[in-house]
Image (tube, helix red, strand yellow):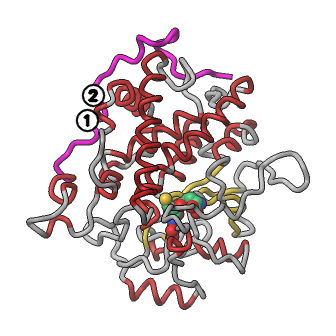
Amino acid sequence: MSCCGGDFVLDKANAGIAYTDEEAEKSAIERGVRPRPQEIKEEIDERGAFVRQPNRFNTPFGEEASQLKAEAGKYRLFWAKGCHWSNRAAIVRELLGLEEAISINLVAATGETNKYGWGFPDEENHEDPVLKIKFLSEVYKNADSEYTGRCTVPALVDITAGKVVNNDYHRLTNYFETAFKPFQDKNAPDLYPVELRKEIDDFNDWLFPNINNAHYRMAFCQSLEAYEEAFEDFYNAMDKLEERLSKNRFLFGDYVTDSDIRFFVTLARWDTHYYRNLGPLKKRVVDYENIWAYARDLYEIPAFKNNTYFRDFAKDKGGNKKLFSSFNGRFADKIDYEAFWSTPQNRKELSKTPDEKFLRA
Ligand SMILES: N[C@@H](CCC(=O)N[C@@H](CS)C(=O)NCC(=O)O)C(=O)O
């Protein structure tokens, strides 16, 4: 899946159920599904820089009539293992205990070449068991028959209507943290405390271009000038974050907040997967003493661990077949990511509440 900057094409040897291009094509024709648009080209500006497509479905959740209403059992979240924009939502849903309220499924590439975009290759009949769709684009089309953009995750879908209602990864976790509060676990952490919201929002707005999207700015740009700009932005930001985390256990002190989830999902993919598209790196994540220990501190939390699939990020299409193949192609299967990310660290020492990582409402 090019959008994740990697080779997210179905690996038949590893997938539970084989899904051929012919099968995908047949289903796509039956359902009137169009091929996945290669819009990446249109997301390159005149300077060769990558400019991400805007989110089409960004109606907020709230109390007003024009807004979406939070309800238990009404929505289904689709996400992809490699995609950190959607990984955020999967982690926050579990942290908040929203598993009963918001159902979930993973999407993956369809067929061998993924001509038709995200689908359900590992499901029986290649079909989502709740919505009975074979391609994510079906629920985008139901929501807007004129939509011509990429059909992306995260996608929050109204189950009864069969329509995407929100794919705004900037705000989705915040809706889970606020509008879905009545459906959270009684003891759920407060990841977005009222008194910190403005600061968290400002921080997240800075994190987006400098860290989260910096990878895509480097990986997708078509000029060296744009590449170098993104490279500088990323490493300058990493230096600032390394300093910040020398004094704070988490980004906002003693407790995990929404910002930590956003930083974690990029860190989890950097040395494992993203580095492959980026050219020579200045530093790996493991070279930042504080950031690396911080990432492992977060990884100890089950909601982070349960939704992080290192081996899937690292998977290299066809890599094992050749003698001269990429590092991941030769070694990813031999690296014990789980053990590596579970190496002990002593971030506790920075906290006034060493045994409690969350602020509970
Ligand atoms: N919605 C955003 C971000 C989410 C996003 O890019 N998701 C990627 C995976 S990381 C995706 O679902 N891509 C599907 C595709 O390109 O067909 C966008 O459209 O740029």
Where residue 348 appears, x then y in whole percent? 42, 15
Q: Residue at x 36, y 62 (%)?
A: 6
Q: Can the viewer see residue 306 in this picture?
A: no
Where residue 138 appears, x then y in whole percent? 62, 76
Q: Single out the residue that lies furthest toward the right.
A: 65
Please, what is the three-letter code of the amino acid marked with disc 1? Answer: Phe
Q: Residue at x 11, y 65 (%)?
A: 324
Secondary structure at numbered mark 1: helix
Residue 205 belongs to magenta span? no
Residue that numbered label 1 is attached to: 340
Q: Give the position of the C terminus as an image quadrant.
A: top right
Q: Would residue 51 be found to the left or right of residue 337 on screen? A: right
Q: Residue at x 28, y 65 (%)?
A: 14
What label sits on residue 17 in the rendered view? none
Please, what is the three-letter code of the amino acid marked with disc 2? Answer: Thr
Where residue 88 appears, x then y in whole percent? 54, 45
Q: Would you identify the image quadrant in which residue 142 lies? A: bottom right
Q: Single out the residue that lies furthest toward the left.
A: 323
User: Disc 1 vs disc 2: Cβ atoms closer than 8 Å?
Assistant: yes
Q: Can the viewer see residue 232 in this picture?
A: yes
Whole-angstrom CA distance, mark 1 to mark 2, is: 6 Å
Residue that numbered label 2 is attached to: 343
Residue 340 belongs to magenta span? yes
Which segment is the magenta one? 333-361
